[in-house]
Image: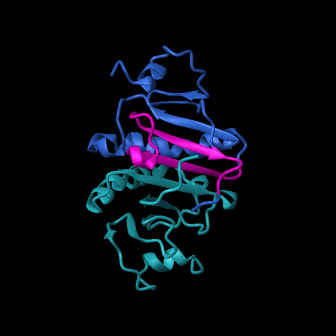
Chain colours: A blue, B cyan
Amino acid sequence: MSDCIFCKIVAGEMDTKFIYEDELVVVFPDIRPKATTHILITAKKHIPSLYSLDEHDTRLMGHMVQLLPVIAKQLGLHSFRTIINTGRDSGQEVDHLHFHLLAGNLPKFG
Amino acid sequence: MSDCIFCKIVAGEMDTKFIYEDELVVVFPDIRPKATTHILITAKKHIPSLYSLDEHDTRLMGHMVQLLPVIAKQLGLHSFRTIINTGRDSGQEVDHLHFHLLAGNLPKFG
């Protein structure tokens, strides 16, 4: 796990400023934003991707989805897009599960 | 609810062929595919968007996320992208909660 940049962020080793934190997740801005707002809801547990989920992760996944509108409301967003990339060809860059929350200057869907 | 096209699909009124169905969701192809593979994981319950979730929906959300890799594996996908659009400006076209599962000829992320 020691080579995982998101594990380092979760552990507080990167001085990342968290927008939100609880026992299951941390939320912080993407360092290479692809929209006006671009933040990452990141599991504290090192799960490489959706393909690595097991049956014990259902509550965590439900929690991460439920957080999306809570964070979006806090940011005052009327609309937002959630993206989860799974696998290199999809655009997943870090093998530690995270949901992208994007808003403003979004590419057209499709 | 009667004007909701996805409620009609869930009720079997549109002769939609389901890839998968259980007590909580139906899964079917998008009629206007935006990638080689483009399917929709759709809640049976009429929830307009992520902004409409309440605390009772956590299990449903966890279930919908858990289904993504299951369906993707069944389709033989090595990589896939999940998109949830919330609000008209994000590209949400139907006000009934659905997750897009896309693979093949994806636009570059960002």
| Quadrant placement of the N terminus of chain A | top left
Name the residue nearer the viewer: A29 or B97.
A29
Residue B12 position within the rendered picture, expressed as x and y whole percent measured from the top left: 41, 82
**Above or below A109: residue A47:** above
Residue at figure coordinates x 46%, y 45% from the top left: A91
Residue at figure coordinates x 61%, y 63% from the top left: B92
Q: Is residue A30 magenta?
A: no
| Quadrant placement of the C terminus of chain A | bottom right
Q: Over which residues does the magenta segment extend?
A: A78-107
**Above or below A26: residue B4:** below
Residue at figure coordinates x 47%, y 51% from the top left: B56
Residue B96 position within the rendered picture, expressed as x and y whole percent measured from the top left: 55, 66
Residue B17 position within the rendered picture, expressed as x and y whole percent measured from the top left: 36, 79
Residue at figure coordinates x 64%, y 59% from the top left: A108
Q: Is residue A81 magenta?
A: yes
Q: Quadrant of residue A96?
A: top left
Q: Is residue A82 left or right of residue B87?
A: left
Name the residue nearer the viewer: B56 or A13.
A13
